[in-house]
Image (cartoon, helix red, strand yellow):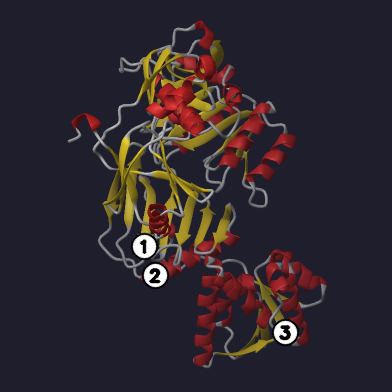
């Protein structure tokens, strides 16, 4: 009897088991099927490695004279391999079965039905039970995660968020055993109900096996084959969190843009699941956006992943679904925050999950990603989860006020006020100062004005650009007065004709500016700033009418006096100028020292 297996029964070992009970059969392996397996393995996909393992077992059966193998057909073209999911490879395999009048063996419902329609002999194989250790066998009722690595002892994390401990088993998982476990996971992820392969990329595979999320990594992505499996140990309800009555009322009636934040393993996903179920119990339509889809929600809540791998496309679909609340699990990249914001501004209630070490860090994740003034409309409530409990609740409000630490009425501006909801007190303020976004803690223990350092930096940055020098010192001596020190040669330029320039800067910064001469160290060598133009070397010293020594690689080559503008000019056709130019071209270090004329011998 001749048999032609397709990829579906090769991957999970069903065909190997089946053909071993039909000794003397001829197995015709389509070159197209082999090419598809090779492509998947070259892409680092676990499903390809699983199929390769089964093909090796078939060749062993042939060596034992139990079956006969023939490889037939041409290798498919690249476009056919890329379109395998569209049925191109399956069609080639059916043609091979037709040519040889052989029985097509498949575990794919669609492949079976198409083959029957075309009049082929078909053997449909159902999935079978495992005969070796499965990933579930590492779990007990208290195990939250299993960590397996090739030739290492298994590690099990047991307990609950905030009170877990790591346990090491007293044996080593060999690479072959781990390959078998990985292969089993991939096969079951592809064919078992309530399971699916979420992602299969070069060196990494993410699989949802019923309620267990599994990540398989292998070289070159990881240094060895590794399997990490995570499972929720219990399902909670919102009542289990002993939420404050005021917060409970806010969640029911006011909160529409919710962030759930916390560190990894703090219990964010467990809480979000309870919150989603809470809204669903209030006759709200709830959906989720997850990648991977691993929240353990009830069947009434539909779980979406990235449409064609893109969460923005998923967001477009959800705008048509007209849900009341959407849970966006694990927001990481900028596009995630933009999708969250777009849906919220469209009127959808949003619950987002972010990693953060502090509650107010979560809201800062939106700064720079959306317009500052929109943040309170997008996020109105932040719930910080710590050790499986709601440890802090923050709210946001957009008001026009004088920022914390300032006392001038003309400095009033729009401010995002972040409050501790339970304690009913301000935690921080967010607003713009110049072209910078400022996050200022309210009630800081520091006695100094929290804006002074920022104001000093802003004034200095603008003056550095205007004067084209780093030799500037700025000190805020009060809330509305700054002392600016610049080199003596730059004082006239900063003040300007009749004080016009410094007055303009005062209007821009909103503070009075006192100008003074910068007292720089003398008798200390400093790097020279020079410019070559019109066959002249201009060395900018910054001191007017001062004697200066010029050094090349710490060797004195010149002593000269600066001009009224603080410059030294050397013509390149002079001996000194020509020599200095050569040194500059050779990349040597040019420095200067201002002579202390008061102590000059």
Residue 459, position in %: x, y?
Answer: 46, 24
Q: Quadrant of residue 88?
A: bottom right
Residue 119, position in %: x, y?
Answer: 81, 76
Q: Camera-side residue: 442 or 102? A: 442
Residue 193, position in %: x, y?
Answer: 59, 55
Vertically, is 159 above or below 271? Answer: below
State the SS at label 3: loop
Image quadrant where one finds the N terminus: bottom right
Residue 177: image tag:
2
Residue 149: image tag:
1
State the SS at label 1: strand
Question: Disc 1 or disc 3, which is closer to the eye?
Answer: 1
Mark 1 surroundings: few (<14), some (14-19) or many (≥20) residues within 10 A: many
Residue at (71%, 77%) from the top-left corner? 77
Residue 222, position in %: x, y?
Answer: 42, 62
Q: Is residue 295 left or right of residue 124?
A: left
Question: Disc 2 or disc 3, which is closer to the eye?
Answer: 2
Residue 102: image tag:
3
């Amino acid at each position: 009897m001749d048999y032609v297996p397709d990829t579906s029964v090769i991957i999970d070992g069903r065909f190997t088991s089946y053909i071993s009970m039909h000794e003397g059969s001829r197995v015709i392996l389509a070159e197209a099927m082999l090419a598809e397996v090779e492509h998947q393995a070259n892409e680092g996909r676990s499903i390809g490695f699983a199929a390769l393992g089964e093909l090796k077992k078939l060749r062993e059966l042939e060596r034992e004279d139990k079956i006969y193998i023939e490889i037939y057909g041409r290798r498919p073209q690249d476009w056919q391999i890329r379109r395998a999911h569209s049925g191109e490879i399956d069609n080639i395999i059916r043609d091979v079965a037709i040519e040889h009048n052989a029985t097509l063996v498949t575990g794919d419902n669609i492949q079976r039905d198409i083959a029957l329609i075309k009049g082929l002999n078909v053997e449909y194989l159902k999935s079978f039970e495992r005969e070796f250790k499965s990933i579930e066998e590492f779990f007990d009722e208290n195990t939250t995660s299993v960590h397996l690595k090739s030739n290492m002892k298994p590690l099990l994390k047991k307990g609950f968020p905030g009170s877990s401990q790591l346990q090491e088993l007293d044996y080593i998982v060999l690479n072959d055993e781990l390959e078998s476990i990985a292969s089993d996971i991939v096969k079951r992820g592809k064919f078992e109900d309530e399971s699916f392969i979420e992602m299969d990329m070069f060196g990494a595979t993410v699989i949802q096996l019923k309620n267990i999320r599994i990540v398989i990594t292998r070289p070159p992505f990881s240094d060895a084959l590794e399997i990490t499996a995570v499972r929720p140990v219990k399902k909670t309800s919102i009542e289990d969190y002993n939420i404050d009555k005021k917060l409970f009322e806010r969640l029911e009636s006011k909160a529409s843009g919710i962030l759930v934040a916390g560190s990894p393993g703090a219990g964010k996903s467990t809480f979000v699941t309870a919150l989603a179920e809470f809204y669903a119990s209030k006759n709200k339509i709830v959906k989720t956006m997850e990648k991977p889809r691993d929240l353990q929600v009830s069947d009434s809540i539909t779980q979406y992943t990235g449409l064609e791998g893109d969460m923005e496309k998923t967001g477009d679909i959800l705008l048509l679904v007209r849900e009341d609340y959407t849970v966006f699990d694990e927001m990481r990249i900028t596009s995630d925050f933009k999708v969250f914001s777009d849906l919220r501004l469209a009127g959808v209630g949003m619950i987002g999950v972010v990693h953060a070490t502090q509650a107010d860090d979560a809201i800062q994740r939106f700064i720079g990603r959306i317009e500052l003034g929109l943040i309170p409309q997008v996020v109105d409530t932040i719930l910080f989860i710590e050790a499986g409990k709601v440890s802090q609740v923050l709210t946001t409000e957009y008001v026009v006020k004088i920022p914390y630490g300032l006392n001038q009425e003309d400095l009033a501006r729009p401010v995002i006020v972040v409050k501790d909801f339970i304690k009913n007190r301000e935690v921080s303020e967010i607003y713009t100062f110049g072209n910078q976004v400022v996050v200022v803690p309210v009630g800081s223990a520091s006695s100094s004005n929290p804006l002074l350092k920022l104001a000093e930096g802003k004034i200095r940055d603008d003056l550095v650009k205007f004067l084209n020098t780093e030799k500037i010192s700025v000190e805020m001596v009060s809330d509305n007065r700054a002392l600016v020190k610049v080199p003596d040669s730059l004082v006239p330029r900063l003040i300007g004709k009749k004080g016009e320039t410094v007055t303009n800067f005062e209007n821009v910064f909103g503070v009075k500016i006192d100008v003074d001469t910068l007292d720089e160290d003398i008798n200390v060598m400093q790097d020279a700033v020079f410019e070559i133009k019109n066959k002249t070397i201009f060395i900018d010293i910054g001191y007017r009418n001062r004697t200066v020594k010029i050094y090349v690689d710490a060797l004195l080559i010149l002593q000269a006096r600066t001009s009224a503008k603080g410059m030294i000019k050397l013509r390149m056709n002079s001996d000194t100028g020509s020599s200095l130019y050569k040194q500059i071209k050779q990349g040597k270090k040019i420095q200067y020292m201002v002579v202390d004329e008061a102590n000059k011998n």
